[in-house]
Image (tube, rainbow, N blue to C red):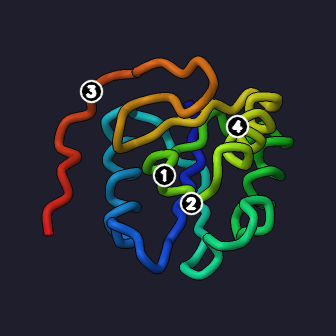
Amino acid sequence: MRAICFIQEAQNSDLTLQQQVLLCRRALRKLRWPCVEELYAQAGTEDRPLSMRPGISDLQRAAAAHEADVLLVVDAGHLHCDRPELEELLSTLLQHGIHTFGAKSGFWIEPGGRHWMTLPGYGIKS
């Protein structure tokens, strides 16, 4: 599976940008999925609608071009969006055959998503 990682930095996040990147990269190694692109939305943009954040337009372009099979995020909460926005994003990606996976939980983040596997070693150390 070819993955795109999306990292959303936030001003009041429990994880730093570097910790989020580390979680995603560990998951990619454990799952043996190659990363074709890493997309970032910087702090201060989490208050904007998801569709207007940096990286989302690149994600939608890559989805339409079938450049990846999975979107990897830390978890749904780290997208910093409300439920309708999240469901719209997931629906759009599924239309292009892209599933969304949460690195921290080991769950697919989509309607009817299932648990994939336990991914050990995800405790964040200070």
Asked whether disc 4 touches disc 1, contact meaning CB atoms under 8 Å apart, the reply is: no
Name the mark on residue 90.
4
Split into 4 quadrants, where in the image is the N terminus?
top right
Quarter of the image holding residue 110? top right
Horizontally, residue 17 falls left or right of residue 89, namely left
Using a 10 Å C-alpha cutoff, classify the residue at mark 4 as few (fewer than 14 neighbours), some (14 to 19) or many (20 or more). some
Q: Is residue 22 above or below residue 32?
A: below
Name the kind of residue labelled 3 in the image. Answer: Thr
Residue linked to disc 2: 80
Split into 4 quadrants, where in the image is the C terminus?
bottom left
Of badges 4 and 1, the one in the foreground is 1
Asked whether disc 2 touches disc 1, contact meaning CB atoms under 8 Å apart, the reply is: yes
Q: Secondary structure at mark 3?
A: loop
Name the mark on residue 108.
none
Horizontally, residue 86 falls left or right of residue 95, namely left
Residue linked to disc 1: 77
Foreground pick, 82 / 98: 82
Foreground pick, 30 / 75: 75
Name the kind of residue labelled 2 in the image. Answer: His
Name the kind of residue labelled 4 in the image. Answer: Leu
Of badges 3 and 1, the one in the foreground is 1
Q: Secondary structure at mark 2?
A: loop
The image position of residue 45, as x and y in percent, is: 65, 76
